[in-house]
Amino acid sequence: MFEHVGLDYLTEYFGRIRKLLADEGWVLNHGITSTDPNDGETGYGGGRFIDRYVFPQGELPHISTVLKTLQDGGLEATDVESLRRHYARTTGLWSQAFEAHGEQLRGMVDQKHWRIWRVYLAGCQWAFEHDEISLYQVLCTKSGRQARGLPWSRRWMYQR
């Protein structure tokens, strides 16, 4: 969700999470990131399109920016996982479902918004597949605290 915060507010955002987090608590933050280490825009005008039509004022930080600002905000990353390839598939499935139900969806919104979401979903799939954007889940605790109860491997996350 940190793509909706804005680069200038990330440290404050993570500081607020720290204040709300129990001393022994964990927080899992899931967010879309830029693959440009300088927090730059995606190619082909994708960022401008999304800013104008889908998520105004969103900014994609690079994962290094996320990790620095969460530490500045008083949190410590205990686990970081890239889900880029998973999100390429996920957005692809969303796009397929959108196309499969296109006529039904057209009846729910005006033509402009139908086209925006059609381009957005297909464009996101392409951007994830071609390393234009990524997605990370970052598990954090308060800085300087022991991650009590945190299992030693990720196996627990994938058990039913």
Image (cartoon, helix red, strand yellow):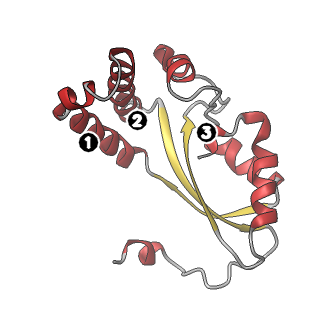
Residue at 54 percent of width and 22 percent of height: 47
Pick out the residue farthest to the front.
Answer: 107
The numbered disc on residue 128 is 2
Callout 2: helix, strand or loop? helix
Residue at 36 percent of width and 77 percent of height: 159
Which mark is in front, 1 or 2?
1
Q: Position of residue 116 (x, y in %)?
A: 39, 20
Q: Viewed as shown, does residue 27 lie left or right of 143?
A: left
**Earlier along the polypeptide chain: callout 1 or callout 2?**
1
Q: CA distance from mark 1 to mark 2?
A: 13 Å
**Quadrant of residue 152 within the rendered picture:** bottom right
Callout 3: helix, strand or loop? helix
Tell me if label 1 and label 3 are in contact, CB under 8 Å: no
Q: Does 33 sit above or below residue 115? A: below
Q: Position of residue 37 (x, y in %)?
A: 64, 33
**Label 2, residues with CA under 10 Å away: few <14, some 14-19, many ≥20:** many
Residue 62 in sight here:
no
Q: Does 41 sit above or below residue 155? A: above
The quadrant the C terminus occupies is bottom left
Q: Which residue is mark 3?
A: 3
Q: Which residue is mark 1?
A: 93
Q: Position of residue 150 (x, y in %)?
A: 59, 80
